[in-house]
Image (cartoon, helix red, strand yellow):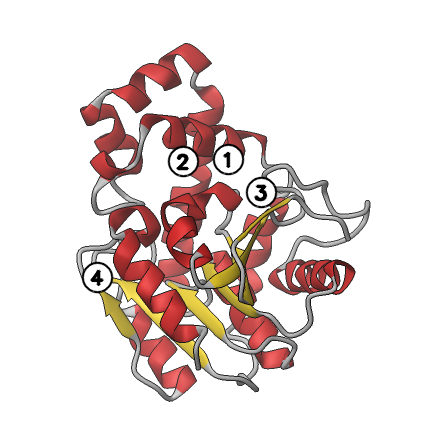
Amino acid sequence: MDLAFERHGAGAPLVLLHGLGHHWQAWLPVLDRLAAERDVIAVDFPGFGASPPLPPGSPYTAESLADAVESFCARLGVREPHVAGNSLGGYVALELASRGVVRTATALSPAGFWNRSELAYARAVLRATRASVVALPEERARAVAEHPLGRAISMGLMTAHPSRLPARALLAAGRALRDARGFDDTLDSLAWLLPPAPPKVPITIAWGERDRLLPRRQAVRAGRWSGQRVKLLRGCGHLPMSDDPALVAGVLLEGSSR
């Protein structure tokens, strides 16, 4: 299907997948670094960002989002790209790796490695975050985004260093979350999300040391599933791209060099 995307750079194709309720702009802090060595394609999932929703009656699941990305790459003429994702996007990257349709996959704090209570906590946080964004008038949202304390309160669960996120990026992320047509259905589907099948291609998993949405103890389970050591992103939260762009870009370039 047709998806909204941004493409920069030259080299081996690297497809970037955002988390639940976000948009491709989540990758802006690392985009230029990656584009210096890769043909970077940052994508909006169906029903998120500027992408159209899935066809009526289609379920919003991690698997259906993976189907959409696979179809998108085929329409774009990109065969077996490298892929990287964050949170839900990380799970979708691993799902594509289990299908063997990508060259490598790198997952940053991927969903799906939680226990029951951790899942309930994450879903409650995400639902409450969206509700607060929906209820906040635009002028008030702008004031919150431009004030250091406002950024700290609104993004403290998602980033380790909210001050490093520009006000305009926070405002844009808030609008993307507010307008995400696929949010509720996708969030509901997470209740049934289990780790994907074993990967058929090389993968890299990295986890924010200070991830407060999907705590880093979940990295232990991801490591057991993958059979390899999970990289620790020191000083980073759940959205590590703005916390330490150089570190994250390095992990993605290394992962897509395997």
Label 1 crowding class (10 Å Cα cut-off): few <14, some 14-19, many 20+?
many
Disc 4/disc 2 C-alpha distance (Å): 22 Å
Name the amino acid, label 1.
Leu
Q: Which residue is mark 1?
A: 177
Residue ID at (62%, 49%): 45
Label 4 crowding class (10 Å Cα cut-off): few <14, some 14-19, many 20+?
many
Name the amino acid, label 4.
Glu
Of the numbered discs 3 and 2, the one sitting upstream in the chain is 2
Query: Can residue 115 be seen in this snapshot?
Result: no
Q: Is residue 173 above or below residue 67?
A: above
Disc on res. 183? 3
Q: Residue 153, percent across and down?
A: 24, 31
Q: Name the side, left or right, on which 60 lies relative to 29.
A: right
Q: Is residue 182 above or below residue 75?
A: above
Secondary element at tag 3: helix
Q: Name the side, left or right, on which 90 lies relative to 151.
A: right
Of the numbered discs 1 and 2, the one sitting upstream in the chain is 2
Question: Given contact means CB atoms under 8 Å apart, are the residues at marks 3 and 2 in contact?
Answer: no
Residue ID at (52%, 55%): 9
Disc 4/disc 1 C-alpha distance (Å): 24 Å
Disc 3/disc 4 C-alpha distance (Å): 26 Å
Disc on res. 132? none
Residue ID at (68%, 66%): 78
Q: Is residue 132 above or below residue 185?
A: above
Q: In the depicted view, which residue is nearer to us: 187 or 33? A: 33
Disc 3/disc 1 C-alpha distance (Å): 8 Å
Question: Given contact means CB atoms under 8 Å apart, are the residues at marks 3 and 1 in contact?
Answer: yes
Name the amino acid, label 2.
Thr
Name the amino acid, label 3.
Phe
Of the numbered discs 3 and 1, the one sitting upstream in the chain is 1
Q: Which residue is mark 4?
A: 209
Q: Which residue is mark 2?
A: 129
